[in-house]
Image (spheres, rainbow, N blue to C red):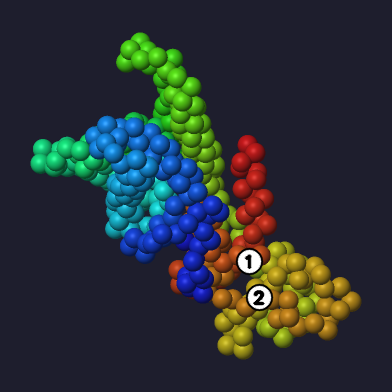
């Protein structure tokens, strides 16, 4: 199933609560959620009678053998998720972690695919890996002895074939949903339209999952029990919540292109760093500018006045305060290209949180100042429409 400033790059991301780190793959943490241990015990309990049939006399060790089977099974899930991670890294997207949980696994990929082909390849490689493991295990059944080893290989084959096929169902958050997203994206040229189509596919899949126990007897000839209904409810809830989250995210992101740094920029005036704050404010008012930047003796912008610090400075003190005293030094993250828009703009200001940013043209000249409050206001206005 399926962005940081240099001074923060070394800091590891916070580990989700209720997880245990068991290692890493290609620089990504491999985490096991607490729910996995519950499922491992359930698998051991379910497998124990079958183990007793093929390998009598194990006694309590049959539960240990069941736990080993659970570990082997989730090892194949880890292969599935690792294939997503390796291909995402191949396309330049950071992967922060791989988490094994009660319903399988999840690969935390930062950023978005740039092209439909990338989305398709990252999504489809997981189910293909599971199918390959399943087919390989089927072939292995021809040469391995029966008994306990044969049971493990048989279970591995069946589980991976099932996972591979089910994950190709075209609905988010399944991998097949991302495949559908890539197809609609390719056909329409609109990534968000692809996400919306795949999210609705996920909702339909969730309804099918909750309906399955009621159809089970007609299709398979077996009467559903309480466990069947519980599993159907859990799977349906997982699919519905994932699809709904994707739908909300797509609708939100579809409004982001309206956020354009150049349109939101405030006109600015530039003053020497040692100019009294009162004089800088007077010049800004005369020019009808909404921001002030400070210059060094060579005329190079070195700071941007913080609006909150300016408002907190009493007017009677402003003639005696240098403008530089309420300005933030222009670190690299506070200089942004004036043409930034949409998600790129949001990511850029998220990397270096601040109240103001200086927008510069390609030749380095200052275009204006962008404030976080203006971006927030514009975002709320577009969302509320």
The kind of secondary structure element at disc 1 is loop
Which residue: 48% across, 57% down? 20
Label annotation for residue 158: none
Q: Quadrant of the C terminus?
A: top right
Which residue: 83% across, 84% down? 320
Farthest left residue in view: 143
Which residue does the numbered mark 1 point to in the structure image? 354
Q: Position of residue 111 (x, y in %)?
A: 43, 54
Q: Is residue 143 among what the camera can see? A: yes
Q: Residues within 10 Å of mark 1 (few under 14, many from 20)?
A: some
Q: Residues within 10 Å of mark 2 (few under 14, many from 20)?
A: many
Q: Is residue 195 among what the camera can see? A: no
Q: Are the two marked residues, 2 and 1, in contact with CB atoms closer than 8 angstroms?
A: yes
Q: CA distance from mark 2 to mark 1?
A: 9 Å
Which residue does the numbered mark 2 point to in the structure image? 328
> Earlier along the polypeptide chain: callout 2 or callout 1?
2
Q: Position of residue 207 (x, y in %)?
A: 46, 23
Q: Quadrant of the N terminus?
A: top left
Height in image: 228 above or below 141? Answer: above
């Amino acid at each position: 199933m399926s962005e940081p400033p240099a001074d923060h790059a070394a800091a590891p991301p916070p580990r989700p609560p209720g997880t245990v780190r068991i290692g890493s793959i290609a620089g990504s943490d491999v985490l096991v959620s607490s729910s996995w241990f519950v499922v491992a015990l359930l698998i051991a309990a379910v497998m124990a009678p079958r183990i007793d049939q093929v390998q009598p006399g194990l006694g309590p060790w049959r539960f240990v053998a069941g736990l080993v089977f659970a570990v082997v099974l989730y090892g194949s899930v880890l292969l599935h998720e690792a294939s997503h991670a390796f291909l995402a890294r191949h396309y330049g997207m950071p992967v922060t972690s791989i988490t094994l949980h009660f319903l399988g696994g999840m690969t935390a990929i930062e950023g978005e695919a740039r092209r439909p082909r990338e989305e398709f390849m990252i999504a489809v490689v997981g189910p293909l890996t599971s199918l390959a493991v399943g087919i390989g295990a089927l072939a292995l059944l021809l040469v391995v002895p029966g008994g306990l080893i044969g049971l493990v290989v048989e279970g591995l084959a069946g589980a991976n074939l099932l996972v591979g096929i089910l994950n190709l169902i075209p609905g988010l958050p399944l991998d097949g949903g991302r495949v559908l997203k890539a197809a609609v994206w390719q056909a329409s040229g609109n990534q968000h339209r692809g996400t919306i189509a795949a999210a609705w596919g996920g909702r339909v899949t969730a309804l099918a999952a909750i309906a399955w126990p009621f159809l089970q007897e007609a299709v398979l000839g077996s009467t559903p029990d309480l466990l069947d209904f519980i599993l159907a409810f859990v799977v349906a809830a997982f699919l519905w919540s994932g699809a709904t989250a994707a739908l909300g995210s797509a609708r939100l992101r579809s409004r982001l292109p309206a956020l354009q740094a150049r349109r939101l920029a405030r006109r600015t005036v530039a003053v020497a760093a040692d100019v009294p704050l009162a004089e800088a404010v007077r010049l800004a008012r005369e020019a009808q500018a909404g921001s002030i930047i400070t210059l060094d003796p060579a005329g190079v912008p070195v700071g941007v006045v913080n609006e909150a610090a300016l408002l907190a400075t009493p007017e009677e003190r402003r003639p005696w305060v240098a403008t530089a005293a309420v300005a933030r030094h222009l670190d690299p993250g506070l200089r942004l290209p004036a043409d930034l828009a949409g998600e790129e703009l949001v990511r850029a200001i998220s990397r270096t949180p601040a109240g103001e940013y200086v927008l510069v043209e390609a030749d380095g000249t200052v275009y204006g100042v962008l404030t976080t409050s203006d971006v927030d206001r514009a975002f709320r206005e577009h969302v509320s429409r």
